[in-house]
Image (tube, helix red, strand yellow):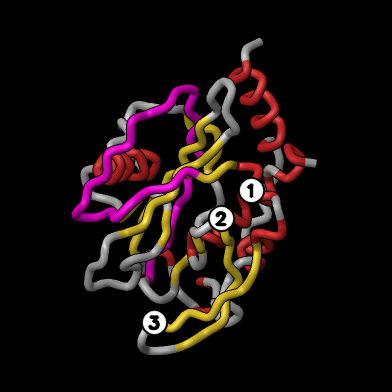
Amino acid sequence: MNFFESFKKRLLLALDKDLLGEVSHKKMSPPARKTMGELGVLEKDVKIASVAIHLFAIENEEPQFVLMLRSDYPGTHSAQVSFPGGKRDNSDPDLEYTARRESEEELAIPVTSGELVKKLTPMYIPVSNFLVHPFLILHSEKIPIRINTDEVKEYFFVQLKDLFDNSNISETIINNGKIQFRTPCYNFGEIMVWGATAVILSELQDVLEELFN
């Protein structure tokens, strides 16, 4: 069994459990963040989006996932670190395809590349009224990343093991020009991850914890 097949086997075993959903989400959420239920928001009234967690398991390399820094634009999520992803198009056959299509548009990761291994718990972003569906996609080969500069400023690879180093978790103060608040965040070197991306990573950290114990 080669490295990829061995890693995939261990990964699937770790993923073969119930997700913790909001229990995981709250660990990395701003204290004031509320769920759809708490806000009385109905699913029919939200905007739908998908993101892809592209996990690369390459021989002689540490497994790693890709993040990107969004370009500056007039919008809620401008200049934030995120996964590739975006709003569902009416022409998308399903939400996994939305995540894959956006990954190709933003980072040139082909729609057909990689294997879906888990859909994580959707999470609601009150400030933009998006319900975000995360998809974990496993790759056995490196893919040349080319950014769409209209949407992406730069991209980063983060070693999966760094997600399980609790010294990488801290708090930061965010000032978006309207309000100021304190929130948990991940620090991967110079990369600070907070908000929806950190919330999604928190569930990934919980579900894969046994891989690194």
Q: Quadrant of the C terminus?
A: top right
Q: Pick out the residue farthest to the right.
A: 213
Image position, residue 44 (x, y; %)? 37, 65
Res. 163 visible in picture: yes
Name the side, left or right, on which 185 lies relative to 176.
right
Q: Quadrant of residue 125?
A: bottom left
Image position, residue 3 (x, y; %)? 62, 18
- State whether residue 44 is above or below residue 144: below
Q: Amino acid at mark 3?
A: Asn
Name the side, left or right, on which 27 lies relative to 68.
right
The residue that label 3 is drawn on is 176
On residue 162, the disc is 1
Q: In the rendered structure, which segment of residues is drawn in magenta?
A: 129-157
Q: CA distance from mark 2 to mark 3?
A: 22 Å
Q: Pick out the residue farthest to the front.
A: 190
Image point (56%, 76%), residue name: 172
Name the side, left or right, on which 43 lies relative to 209.
left
Q: Are marks 2 and 1 in contact (CB under 8 Å)?
A: yes
Residue 37 highlighted magenta (yes or no): no
On residue 188, the disc is 2
- State whether residue 84 is above or below residue 118: below
- The answer to which of marks 2 and 1 sits earlier in the sequence is 1
Q: Quadrant of the N terminus?
A: top right
The mark closer to the camera, 2 or 3, is: 2
Q: Amino acid at mark 2?
A: Phe
Front position in the image: 120 or 162: 162
Secondary structure of the residue carrying numbered label 3: loop
Q: Pick out the residue farthest to the top.
A: 1
Q: CA distance from mark 2 to mark 1?
A: 7 Å
